[in-house]
Amino acid sequence: MRLAPKKNCQLILDTDNHYLGALKGNQGNLHKSVQANFIAEDSYTEVSKGHGRLEKRVVSLCTTLDNIKPWPGLKTLIRVESERHFKKGGQPHLETETRYYVASFLESAESLARRIRGYWGVENKVHHIRDVTQGEDASRIRMHQLPQIFAVARNFALNLYRSNEFANMAQAERLCKFGLDTLKAIFRMK
């Protein structure tokens, strides 16, 4: 199935909803015009420390859409500039990254920063676990409805682990592989 972000945005708008989405290089013309014409009108800075690194994020907004390629319902351009300081092999390192987002609504830079961070929370909580712990990206299952069926099964397993108060999904997977008694307890079977 081919992804069609422009059509998806229009479909979202047609159902009286709004979108906030990452703008990636596969939307070449829009991505290039945003990079070339982005003028920050409002910004919000947040600094966080954890996991052995210091991260500074500057979220900037642009609502001036002159010279921006047409996009359904586009009202706000968002730029997130991240700067991460960490040690690797005992040596200090610096990583920088700039990401762009598009939105069909107007909000403050602080509010959009919270929304974007919330999205990454979902990415880390669900998608990363499915990709890394459950090996979804490495799966060779490609036929008919099987990918969707296995995705449902993976989500079901994650929900069971969480309902049994596992904080570490990899640990839960390993424990469940030990035997039928463990699986019965997780599934609340006799």
Image (tube, rainbow, N blue to C red):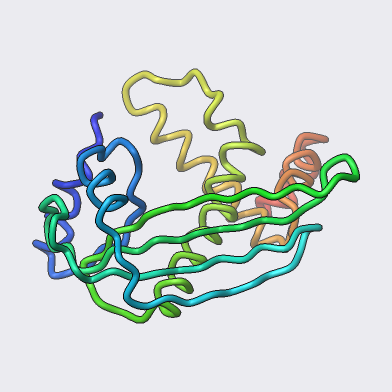
State left or right for residue 155 relative to residue 169: left
Q: Quadrant of the N terminus?
A: top left
Q: Position of residue 91 (x, y in %)?
A: 86, 45
State left or right for residue 51 relative to residue 29: right
Name the residue located 36 percent from the left edge and 52 percent from the top edge.
Answer: 22
Does residue 130 appear anywhere in the picture? yes
State left or right for residue 126 relative to residue 2: right
Q: Position of residue 45 (x, y in %)?
A: 54, 75
Number of callouts? 0
Name the residue located 90 percent from the left edge and 45 percent from the top edge.
Answer: 90
173 lies above or below 121:
above
Does residue 190 appear anywhere in the picture? no
6 lies above or below 150:
below
Q: Position of residue 173 (x, y in %)?
A: 73, 41
Q: Position of residue 29 (x, y in %)?
A: 20, 40
Name the residue located 22 percent from the left edge and 48 percent from the top edge.
Answer: 33
Name the residue located 64 percent from the left edge and 48 percent from the top edge.
Answer: 95
In the foreground, 179 or 96: 96
In the foreground, 148 or 122: 122
State left or right for residue 43 relative to residue 190: left
In the foreground, 92 or 175: 92
